[in-house]
Image (spheres, coloured by chain):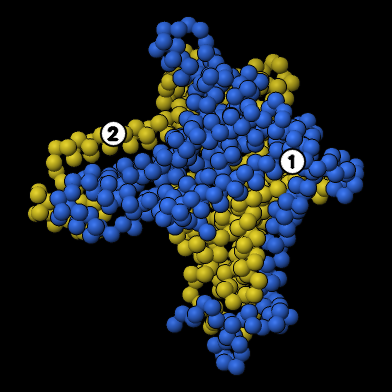
Amino acid sequence: MATDLATPPTAARKSTRPKRADKVPLGMAVLRYRWLYLMLVPGVAYFAIFKYLPMYGVTIAFQDYLPFLGYSGSPWVGLKHFEQLFSGPDFARLLANTLILAALHILFVFTAPVIVALMLNELRVNILKRSIQSLIYIPHFLSWTIVAALTYVLFAADFGVIAGWMRDLLGDTTKIDYMAQEQWFREIVIMQQLWKMTGWGTIIYLAALAGVDPNLYEAARMDGAGRFRQLWHVTLPAIRPTVVVMAILASGNLLDSGFEQIWLMTTSLNREVAEVFDTYVYYAGVQNGNFSYSTAVGLFKGVAGVILIFGSNWLAKRMGQRGLF
Amino acid sequence: MTTMTETKPKKLAVEHHGSAGSRVFDVLNVVALVGLALITVLPLIYVLAASLASEPEIAARPFFLWPEKVVTEAYEYIFATPTFIRSLLTTVVVTAVGMVVQVMLTFTMAYPLAKRYLPGRTLVLNLVIFTMVFSGGMIPTYLVVRDLGLLDSYWALILPLAINPFYLIIVKSFFQELPQALEEAARIDGCNEMGVFLKIVLPLSKPIIATFSLFYAVAIWNDYMSPLLYISDPDKWTLQILVRQLIATDPAAALSQMDRTWVPPEQGVKFAIIVIATLPILFFYPFLQKHFAKGVLIGGVKE
């Protein structure tokens, strides 16, 4: 019944027509599929204007871009802005802040969904399982503004719940401003990510777990495997490919600290540890008007991200896993 | 083994034994997961409760899930300020218009890309996927928006985010799964591709259109970066910007309420604005939840 997807719709009627559309001259193809091409136009225009034009725009990283001279009129300066970035006082701090957040992210935020998915998978009471899932998915749909605001009302020094508890617990009467202090910034940011992302992150692993053949557990049990042996020999191998794919995807975002979250959590008091490449681009570019320098910072981050994603894909394949590409 | 006599259907992915260690594990597992669920929702319930509590109560009680005395002064104050009403209207209109634009663009682009026989399809797909790996970045995008004259325009909140490539690919996969026989029949009846799309494909896609409408709506509603970047006129603030202003600064100043005779319930306003900005999402949450898993899986498994 279902026609072969690779066959043009008209081929079913007239067998004289070429079966493979790519053999048709382009002009004829355009004419035959004019409606389909017409439908592509708005979408292609979107990607051209808002995705590819900015990619061309990164050339200003190699210019001293002046708004009234434009892309073509601004003088070329080669790698000046990159040199300024790498030799400047900010670079080491930005790189350290970004990498520390990335490391903490992998250590806690990336692994938490795997663990929670495994725990949910062991739940036998289905109603309980589904209710817990419904509840822990909620934060995914809340904005970073809301998450930051929640953090504020919970941690605020004067009326925050957690600040109050900590005061009682430590018997300390001084008001600790967790939101403003350097030493708490990373802890709070990672806690926010855990709260917002863990539940949603389990979905993909739960899907992989649902696909495991029950007979495998049966067989393992016959062989005398207890629950933890089953987990080790059946469940974990089943989700390994999914974990690898997610890890490759995450590696591309390693330098992406997430602009909105970090920006919302940055104060004048914690800037020293809070500033990352993402927020620095905004700060230097939009706020201070250094378009070229700021673009160079963004380009460095973007290229590093591409290298990381292809690198980890290559590594995954070397280690005998299926990669992304 | 104690499971020998069990007659449970094999469908249950994992059949467990009743050994003592196993039972201890089960109990601990349930306790941990329930704890996780509580950590997730309790802050939200506290914010709702505190938004309905009086200022002295917020100051006096450390944590509560229901106020001793329900007062609505925070909400009354917020709803009496023009700044709030304006930002609420802005956000609602931008979300509604943006959602329609985004869904239209995404679905019209996904349909031709689902046709494996279309010459050039792979090229377009690869160009789309490349944008998921690399982007020009914040500043070049900002300059494009500026050069288009969109700064301080509501379109700046919609157009730069018009198509989410992930959603596009999920919708494309969905179209590929539709039965081809139906389209064939329509074509024999004289429909052109556009007719097939409008009369056959779209009616079949209602659930997935609903899903992605909600996803896009949530994304615009929650967007903080675009208004921060592209909107400098305070009259055009969106709700998310207002939330930020109210939390980070003095509420009275952020709401530009010059009426000094009415002292704002300062903490209460902070709680209330969080509730107001969250409520629509929680209202639609059951619908979101119903569909997303399917959507995520189509995208994750098929591509």
- Colour of chain B in the rendered structure image: yellow
Disc 2 crowd, CA 10 A, few/some/many (<14, 14-19, 20+):
few
Report x, y in % for residue A100. 53, 31
Q: Taking B160 as reference, is A5 left or right? A: left
Regarding mark 2 in the picture, which secondary structure is present there? helix
* Nearer to me, B56 or A255: A255
Mark 2 and mark 1 on one chain: no
Label 1 is placed on what type of residue?
Answer: Thr
Disc 1 crowd, CA 10 A, few/some/many (<14, 14-19, 20+):
many
* Nearer to me, A136 or A97: A97
As drawn, the label of residue B31 is 2
**Image position of A185 with respect to A29: above or below:** above
**Image position of A280 with respect to A158: above or below:** below
Residue lying at 50% horizontally and 19% vertically, measured from the top left: A160
Report x, y in % for residue A127. 30, 46
Q: Which residue is mark 1?
A: A295
CA distance separating discs 2 and 1: 49 Å
Residue lying at 41% horizontally and 10% vertically, measured from the top left: A170
Does the image show residue A240? yes
